[in-house]
Image (cartoon, rainbow, N blue to C red):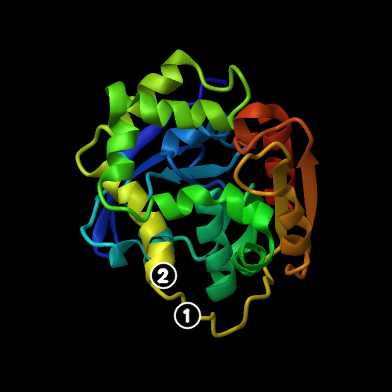
């Protein structure tokens, strides 16, 4: 089946987002939320499989990334704004409830949505990112995770992270991808796509501002508490160099309903390393 991916720009939460979409317009809606330093293309191994399974797939470039708007200021990248973008996206397409799949930062946004607007979500899949309260507690108690998270503190500096990423025709950014992935995970075509996305005006600062807002903008405690009532499946590549797999089970423990699948040989980029099995588990869970 030849799956056509369409592209459009929509208005949401006072900004514009570029959205890649595929699948039948009347299919169950799924929103795919990418992480850092990614954009919609980070789901290119999932979009055709989900569309072929009958889902209506929406994969935005989140704010600050690739072709989406890049508002100025660190406060513009606070979690409540990121979450409001997704709700606005759903509203734009007339969707009362959606299925969410989030990786890395996209997973963090998904956790936040599940805690604050569970009535808007049907089911959720999280890839390689812990529940926010688990991440916070682990950083306070685990020197091992604190050491792995050194880059978060580096990213707080002005201009230096951007300069490092741009170094030698984006070799700095590509090196970060290679260091966190299995050998051969990313192809030459993938690297060309990433270079093009990162080169969009304002994109690099926009992406780093996600991390800057994390440290500088207080996150209000959700009114309904931090328990997750949305059915949640967690997929975790155990060879993630940035996030300890020990955080996966405590994250599941904060969910009323869900399960956890480890991929022993996969990295942070589990949706690439184990695409076929990840696709199967996503489709199975979201189709319930």
Give the camera-side residue of 279 and 149. 149
The residue most toward the top is: 188
Can residue 161 be seen?
yes
Q: Residues within 10 Å of mark 1 (few under 14, many from 20)?
A: few
Q: In the rendered view of the protein, which quadrant contains the N terminus? A: top right
Task: Write down the residue under mark 1.
Answer: 220
Q: Are marks 2 and 1 in contact (CB under 8 Å)?
A: yes
Vertical arrangement, residue 48 with respect to residue 105, above or below: above
Q: Residue at position x 73%, y 67% from top?
A: 255
Question: Measured along the vertical axis of the image, is residue 162 above or below residue 248?
Answer: above
Up/down of 273 relative to 74, above or below: above
Q: Secondary structure at mark 1?
A: loop
Provide residue 56's location: percent of width, then percent of height: 52, 44
Quarter of the image holding residue 184?
top right
Q: Position of residue 244 (x, y in %)?
A: 69, 49
Place residue 53 in its image quadrant.
top right
Q: Earlier in the sequence, mark 2 or mark 1?
A: 2
Q: Name the residue located 45 percent from the left edge and 26 percent from the top edge.
A: 175
Residue 28 at least partly seen: no
Pick the front one: 280 or 209: 209
160 sits left or right of 249 in the view: left
- Horizontal side of 100 relative to 170 (left or right) equals right
In the picture of the structure, the residue carrying the numbered disc 2 is 80
Quick one: SS at disc 2? helix
CA neighbours of label 2 inside 10 A, class few (<14), some (14 to 19), many (20+): some
């Amino acid at each position: 089946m030849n799956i056509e991916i369409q592209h459009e720009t929509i208005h949401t939460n006072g900004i514009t987002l570029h959205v890649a979409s595929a699948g039948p317009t009347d299919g169950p809606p799924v929103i795919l939320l990418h992480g850092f330093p990614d954009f919609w293309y980070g789901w290119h191994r999932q979009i055709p499989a989900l569309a072929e399974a009958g889902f209506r797939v929406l994969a935005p470039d989140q704010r600050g990334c690739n072709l989406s708007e890049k508002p100025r200021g660190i406060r513009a990248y606070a979690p409540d704004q990121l979450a409001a973008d997704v709700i606005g996206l759903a509203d734009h397409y007339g969707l009362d409830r959606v299925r969410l799949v989030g990786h890395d930062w996209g997973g963090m946004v998904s956790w936040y949505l599940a805690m604050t607007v569970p009535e808007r979500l049907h089911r959720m899949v999280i890839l390689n990112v812990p529940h926010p309260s688990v991440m916070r507690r682990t950083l306070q108690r685990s020197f091992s995770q604190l050491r792995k998270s050194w880059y978060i503190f580096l990213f707080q500096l002005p201009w230096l992270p951007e300069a490092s990423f741009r170094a030698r025709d984006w070799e700095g950014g590509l090196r970060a991808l290679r260091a966190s992935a299995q050998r051969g995970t990313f192809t030459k075509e993938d690297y060309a796509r990433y270079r093009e996305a990162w080169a969009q005006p304002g994109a690099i600062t926009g992406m780093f501002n996600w991390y800057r807002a994390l440290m500088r903008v207080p996150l209000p405690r959700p009114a309904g508490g931090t328990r997750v009532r949305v059915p949640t499946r967690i997929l975790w590549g155990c060879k993630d160099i940035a996030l300890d797999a020990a955080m996966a089970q405590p994250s599941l423990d904060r969910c009323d309903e869900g399960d956890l699948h480890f991929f022993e040989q996969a990295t942070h980029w589990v949706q690439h390393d184990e695409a076929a099995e990840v696709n199967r588990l996503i489709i199975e869970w979201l189709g319930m």
